[in-house]
Image (cartoon, helix red, strand yellow):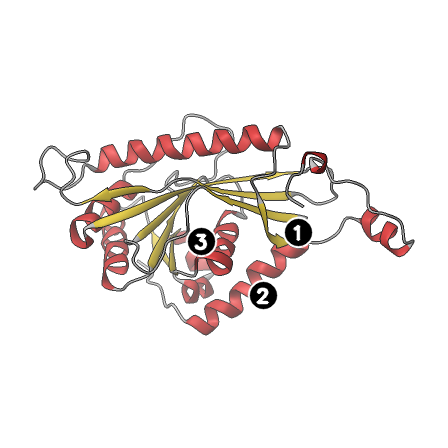
Amino acid sequence: MITARKHPLLNRLIYISLVKAPLRSSFHRIYLRQAAAPPGPDSPPVIMFGNHSAWWDAHLVMALNEEQWHTDGYVMVEDTQLSRYGFFRWCGAFSVNRRDPRSAVESMNYAINLLTEAPRRSLLIFPQGEIRANDARPLVFFQGAGRIASKVAMQAGACALYPIALRYEFIGEQKPDGFISVGQPIVVHRGDEAWSRSASAPPDPRQITARMEQALTEELDCLRADVVAYRLSSFTSLIRGAWSINRIWDAVRGLEQIRRVGEDDGSAQ
């Protein structure tokens, strides 16, 4: 497997130049809402798991971490992708090869060690394992995420899993808007019989995976319903992107800007 080579300065430079700058130039806004407070200094190890519907997905979650959460973030990436774009190792990327069971186990053990050997660590996983249409149902996850969460909980005492729903829409502007909706974390505790047959048994990875599928499905469906209905008041702007041509032209002529879609109900500006 290809291991991470996390470097704080290079991580920041890559984020500013190859993640944030393209988001600003390619999107009108990146919007965020969170159902719970971000992980704090005393939070258990964090696993962020999201739907994988677009090339931009990891960029949005990295923006969430760099702008808001400030955890020591890592991400599991397909080996074929990381071998092409190895510089993302400096941002905490490491590889997984799901076609090789032995290599996949090595990557899971590496992820477990990362999450348990130092505080304030987080791991981003796209457990669908491939890009799927945003509204495709049911969500089907690989079992690896549940196994990682189970073993982390056994070693660290607990593991917090945050469902992150991602969506992209054109809403009355020249460029699309990106949406990040973070649900309530699923906290897996060591010794909690809700996750295992007995207090001494490890949490059941299959049960964890099923709960993750349910939580992300609910978050995605709620996000879709709110965006389609233009109910945007629960969102804040994480990153402000480029103006549409008509807004630039109106500003040059000194005209009042036209109202944004959904703005008349007091939604996010």
Q: Pointers 2 and 1 in contact (CB under 8 A)?
A: no
Note whether 266 is above or below 16 in the view shown: above
Disc number at residue 17? 2
Compared across the picture, whether 193 is left or right of 44 comes to left
Say which label, 2 or 1, has the lower sequence index. Answer: 2
Q: Position of residue 152 (x, y in %)?
A: 22, 51
Residue 206: x %, y % from top left: 23, 33
Q: Residue 81: which numbered mark, if any? A: 3
Q: Name the residue carrying label 1.
A: 26
Number of other residues with Cα within 10 Å of mark 3, as a class: few under 14, some 14 to 19, many 20 or more: few
Residue 224, above or below 91: above
Residue at image point 26% right, 41% down:
146
Q: Amino acid at mark 1?
A: Ser
The reply to whether the C-beta atoms of the residues labelled 3 and 2 are less than 8 Å apart is no
- Estimate the spatial distance between the alpha carbons at disc 1 and disc 3, rounded to whole Å: 22 Å
* Mark 1 crowd level (few <14, some 14–19, many ≥20, 10 Å Cα): some
State which tag comes first along the sequence, 1 or 3: 1
Indicate the position of residue 119 as horizontal and vertical percent values: 28, 63
Quadrant containing the N terminus is bottom left
**Amino acid type for the residue under numbered disc 2:** Ser
Residue 145, given in percent of the width and then of the height, sits at 30, 43
Q: Is 104 on the left or on the right of 13, as rendered?
A: left
Helix, strand or loop at mark 3:
helix
Going 52% across and 66% down the picture, which residue do you hit? 14
- Of labels 3 and 2, earlier in sequence is 2
Identify residue type, mark 3: Gln
Mark 1: which secondary structure? helix
